[in-house]
Amino acid sequence: MQNSAKKAAIIHQTDREQQIEQEASHVGTSIIFILSSLIGVWGLTCLLSGISQHGAIELIKSWMAAFLDSH
């Protein structure tokens, strides 16, 4: 009887540890998602700012010049 109670306690503890690990994984994934979203929004903001200040054609010319000079 004590043996089965110990096994049940061990299984319960293992289930609890797995649940904690799963929740920690969800928190970590959420943090990564939020940060990557912020980086994407910042990049889009910079792109729109460059287009509004210099125009799309000038921005493409500058990008092409930088790309071709690097190769």
Image (cartoon, rainbow, N blue to C red):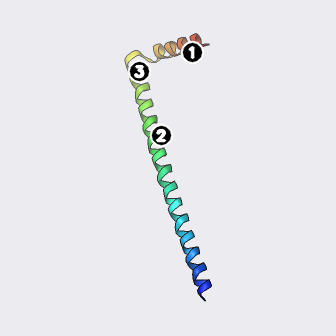
Residue 68 in the image: state x and y as whole percent: 59, 12
Helix, strand or loop for disc 1: helix
Disc 2 to disc 1: CB gap under 8 Å: no
The reply, left or right, for residue 2 in relation to residue 47 is right
> In the image, what residue occupies the spot 49% across and 13% down?
62
Report crowding for label 2: few under 14, some 14 to 19, many 20 or more residues within 10 A (C-alpha): few
The numbered mark, 1 or 3, whose residue comes first in the sequence reads 3
Residue 3 in the image: state x and y as whole percent: 62, 84
Report crowding for label 1: few under 14, some 14 to 19, many 20 or more residues within 10 A (C-alpha): few
Report crowding for label 3: few under 14, some 14 to 19, many 20 or more residues within 10 A (C-alpha): some
> In the image, what residue occupies the spot 38% across and 24% down?
49
* Quarter location, residue 34: top left
Badge number at residue 36:
2
In the image, residue 26 sits, relative to residue 12, either above or below, namely above
Disc 3 to disc 2: CB gap under 8 Å: no
Q: What is the distance, in whole Å, between disc 1 and disc 3 at their CAs? A: 17 Å
